[in-house]
Image (spheres, rainbow, N blue to C red):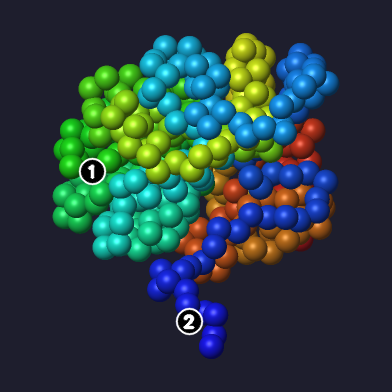
Amino acid sequence: MEIKELLRDEIKNLIPYEANQIDCKIKLDANESPYDMPEIIKAEVSKLFADNTGVNLYPDTDSNELRTALAKKWNLDKDMFMVGNGSDQVIQVLTNTFVGKGDKVLCMAPSFSMYGLSAQINGAEAINYHMKEETGYSIDPREFIIQAKEIKPKVIYLCNPNNPTGSLIPIASIKRILEECMDSIVVVDEAYNEFVNVSCVELLKTYKNLIILRTFSKAFGLAGVRCGYSIASKEITNYLNRVRPPYNLNSITQRVCTITLKHQNLIDEYIAKINVECKWLYNELLKIDGIKVFESFANFFLIKVNNSQKIAKMLLEDGILVRGYGASSELKDCIRVSVGTREQNEAFAQSLTNALKA
């Protein structure tokens, strides 16, 4: 007997999400914050470890302290929040809640691949709305709505700002989609929204089919502790919690994120510094011949360049890791670079210039 024959059909041809695990001097491939935890927060976290951590006990299965802190941050009811082991887990929970075999899910493309992967794992069909390079990878809400009405998806995913293109969907366009697609759950992934601050949270008061995703991995600089969360109506959140695994978020992550939320002012300072670097790097990239850089509302840039895989390899030879795309990808001629510190950004711009001249 071949073990493969025991696999579910949906898994046999599944192409897993691949994260780079490559040694480098400057890591600019995963849209992480270049800044470590502020010293004040470090001190509080250190005290947490110095005191009785309680890790011999299971964590609070409902993450009550963290959800209370989130409710205070957003001025919403605690029961509108569900937290998970990264946004990936939240996406899988909501997929398990709403999407089954034979259902359809509508995604932007190119965009975050976990939306489609989670649907495929559940036996659903992920259908893409293909954005065009000539429009800066933006969506036409009229075309998007027409496609949604044709396929009748259970769930619609909108990444805003979009990863990996950096494009932004106007709130007015999202409202149109919500109003015209009331028979679908509309998920707006705001993983990078702190860098532009045009959230859809206010729309939760009007649209019962809206779920918003947020994360501590990007602007908050806590990618290593793995925490994402959803904001939705109490009804939707109750359904999600039926599916969410017990004890899904460990005690340390719950405490670290709760402590960090107390120091939003320090995180805002980091966000401001990153936004300054975004502007600087964008202007520097515009000066380089032989590339096309797309406007971005997030902490990364998509860059079109000839021989992109060769360029990514040459950058790595200089110790700089960026995100490259495979030959079969619709972004095969592109690389994506995270915005780092000024020193990192200068090194990247110089290395890219040298690689293009080689």
How far is the residue under mark 2 from the one under mark 1?
35 Å
Please tell me which residue is depicted at 28% across the width and 29% down the height of the picture.
Answer: 235
Taking the image as shown, residue 130 lies to the left or right of residue 36, namely left
* Location of residue 23 in the rendering, given as x and y in whole percent from the top left corner: 80, 53
* Location of residue 296 in the rendering, given as x and y in whole percent from the top left corner: 51, 36
Nearest the eye: 111 or 244? 244
Residue 101 image-quadrant placement: bottom left
Q: Residue furthest bottom?
A: 1
Q: In the rendered structure, which amino acid carries the disc numbered 1?
A: Ser
Residue 53 numbered tag: none
Element type where label 2 sits in the image? helix
Residue 5 numbered tag: 2
- Mark 2 or 1, which is nearer the eye? 2
Q: In the rendered structure, which amino acid carries the disc numbered 2?
A: Glu
* Location of residue 122 in the rendering, given as x and y in whole percent from the top left corner: 38, 59
Quarter of the image with the C terminus is bottom right
Nearest the eye: 321 or 181? 181
Please tell me which residue is depicted at 69% across the width and 59% down the height of the picture.
Answer: 311
Determine whether label 2 and label 1 are within 8 Å by CB: no
Element type where label 1 sits in the image? loop
Rendered position, 64 above or below 31: above
* Residue ID for mark 1: 184
Taking the image as shown, residue 295 lies to the left or right of residue 239, namely right
* Location of residue 58 in the rendering, given as x and y in whole percent from the top left corner: 63, 34
Please tell me which residue is depicted at 61% across the width and 20% down the height of the picture.
Answer: 258
State whether residue 257 appears in this view. yes
State whether residue 160 appears in this view. no
Please tell me which residue is depicted at 55% across the width and 19% down the height of the picture.
Answer: 65
Residue 91 image-quadrant placement: top left
